[in-house]
Image (cartoon, helix red, strand yellow):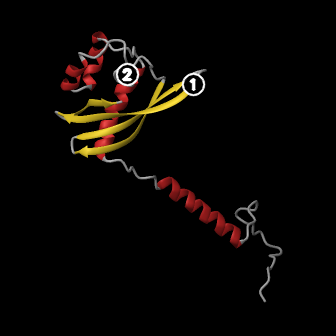
Amino acid sequence: MISRFKLQNSNFRAPFPFFKASGTKLFLILISGFALFLSAACGVPVLEKPECLEAKQTVKEFYSFHFGNEMKFSAENLRPREKFLTGDFVKLLQNAPPDNDVFTTNSTDFPKAFRIGGCEVTAADKAVFEVLLFWKDDKRTEQRAIGVEAIKQNGEWLINKINY
């Protein structure tokens, strides 16, 4: 039987005297470190289609701008939003009722926040997003979803339709 033997009268010093671990403990520490390395190196792959990723930026920028400014509809409030919208959609909105929020609920019940949800690519140049709208105050907490269609025109993604 092999047993531990002590070095007597020797100047030998263990390289890490504070680290006294058995072979099993050392193996577990090394495996844990390797697993940690792999989890940091291997990220979660992006599962959204490229069209969704490109169009999502436009939809997010538009709603960030919209929620950060006056949400009541008017010709004056439409002008700064036109850069995010197709020409056909702008023409359609010119006859919209004033004071409603035509970009969220088409009513005077303005949401407090939004979040971009799922995306479905319906054609190579068309994506439909679910935009979640939120209301939270002393009286209610509510969430609703609308559909926002974005199409690619002249290399740019623009909002073309909103389904309430």
Instruction: Residue at 37% x, 16% y: name it.
Output: 100
| Lateral position of residue 37 relative to residue 115, left or right | right
Q: Secondary structure at mark 2?
A: helix
Q: Which kind of residue does numbered mark 1 sit on?
A: Arg
How far apart are labels 1 and 2 at the CA level? 25 Å
Crowding near the residue tagged with mark 2, few <14, some 14–19, many ≥20 C-alpha atoms within 10 Å = some
Disc on the earlier residue, 1 or 2 = 2
| Lateral position of residue 121 relative to residue 135, left or right | left
Label placed on residue 65: 2
Coordinates of residue 42 in the picture (x, y in percent):
46, 56
Which quarter of the figure has residue 162? top left
Coordinates of residue 124 in the picture (x, y in percent):
21, 45
The residue beneath circle 1 is 140
Q: Is residue 74 above or below residue 51?
A: above
From the viewer's side, name the closer residue of 41 and 142.
Answer: 142
Which quarter of the figure has residue 96? top left
Q: Is residue 84 above or below residue 78?
A: below
Crowding near the residue tagged with mark 1, few <14, some 14–19, many ≥20 C-alpha atoms within 10 Å = few
Coordinates of residue 127 in the picture (x, y in percent):
28, 40
**Image quadrant occupied by the N terminus:** bottom right
Q: Which kind of residue does numbered mark 2 sit on?
A: Phe
| Lateral position of residue 95 relative to residue 62, left or right | left
Instruction: Residue at 33% x, 14% y: name it.
Output: 73
